[in-house]
Amino acid sequence: MWNSSVTTNCHNMEEATFSQAVNGVPGYPTVNQTLCPFGQLRILTASQGFYTYVTPIVFTVGIIGNILSLMVFMSRNMRKLSASTYLAALSISDTCALVFYVLVDWLRRGLPYLPGQQATTFLEDQGLCQMQTYLSYVSRFVSAWIIATFTVERYIGVCHPLRRKSISGSRSAHKVIVSLIFIACVLMIYKPILTGRYEHSTNYYKVARCSRDPNFPFVSFALDSTFALSITLVPFLLISVLNALIIRRLYLRNKRNLKRYIITEESIIRMEFTVILLVVSFVFITLNLPYFYFWCKRFLHTFNSTVPSRKRAAFLDQSESDLLITRVIFYLNYCVNFFLYSVTGAYFRKEMKLLFCYRRYHQYNGSAFRLSYHSNQSTPQSYV
């Protein structure tokens, strides 16, 4: 049977490693250093290793995929479509989330566990701390709600086609996206105000970290909880309900008009973007649910004062492992869309091929022209 001090020391293993890296103390925590039960230490080490080594792959793949997606949606043939405007904005917001949230979080949680135990202490500096936190909150909020607003746009287009002209078009999509960014910037302004560089005492050292203001713990906790719900539960419900209505309407329409439905290129493109939306929103919910579940579980557990301290400490250790693994799954939200577009969108694949073939064609013609020009300049004129 574990006592509370043993499990608490096991739970503080991450803070110990961060403190060692910041203060230049060599060596990883061992079983003797943390007094952690071997089984629990093995679980924590495995989850920490999974987070440390998989997150950089997610980040790299996400950056490349989002840049390629942005290039396709901003191509000449697709940039005028309202759906392309939403998905191009989603690629930009996902890239910002990867840089300001995923990368920074990995530099704090993952980098100290690599050999050498490097620590990016500059991230804890006043000013940079607030700016990075603010941008990470804004980008995550925008990413979640672009999917939600795109779902609303597709719902109106499918279920209320007579109103489609009033809300469709790239100009209308631009207005919606700009309004969404403005709302995010205003709502998230609380975060840099309640965030700063503060000292924290651990079982090992006293370290300065970028964290919430200790003078306003309840306000920060309440606002952060509201933010978490605003990018998870609320979009979940909205997207799930609207997707169900879209699928129902498409099923009924195909059933009634199967024989007399006129197929045009415009209707094919519209249907393809609807399928892309359904897949993207379904994957969004699927990848968010595990992290949201364990986050809620830990959130509710903190308010249960009847739980003995021994069980509370053991639960915190287990939840730390669960959150590390599901956090990586949550990160996939920001890197998986390119593959979803490629699998579900024939028009997307066609435009991507045209984009690269067009570039290769011009590169080839340009190099051929330069080669011909230089050869003519360097070759003496014939006297014959």
Image (cartoon, grey):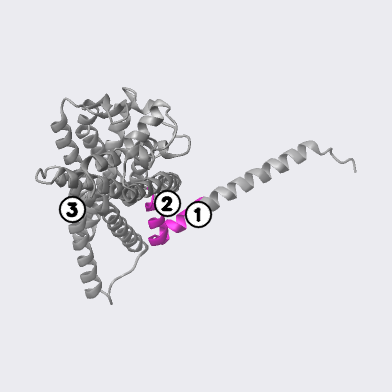
Q: CA distance from mark 1 to mark 2?
A: 10 Å
Residue situated in front as seen by the camera: 305 or 184? 305
Location of residue 375 with respect to 46 vertically, above or below = above
Amino acid identity at mark 3: Leu
Q: For residue 315: magenta?
A: no
Kindly identify which residue carries mark 1: 354
Quarter of image, res 351: bottom left
Along the horizontal axis of the image, is 257 left or right of 72? left
Q: CA distance from mark 3 to mark 1?
A: 36 Å
The x, y position of residue 350, in whole percent, is 46, 58
Q: Position of residue 207 (x, y in %)?
A: 32, 26
**Residue 80 percent across, percent down from the top left:** 36, 48
What numbered label is drawn on residue 77? 2
* In the displayed structure image, the side of residue 339 where residue 296 appears, left or right: left
Cβ–Cβ under 8 Å for marks 1 and 2: yes
Mark 3 or mark 2: whose residue is earlier in sequence: 2
Q: Nearer the viewer, mark 3 or mark 2?
A: 3
Q: Main secondary structure of the magenta part?
A: helix
Question: Which residue lies under the disc numbered 3?
Answer: 238
Q: Residue furthest top?
A: 126
Q: Position of residue 51 (x, y in %)?
A: 38, 46
Residue type, mark 1 in image: Leu
- Horizontal placement of 348 versus 327: left or right? right
Is disc 2 placed on a helix, strand or loop? loop
Q: Earlier in the sequence, mark 1 or mark 2?
A: 2
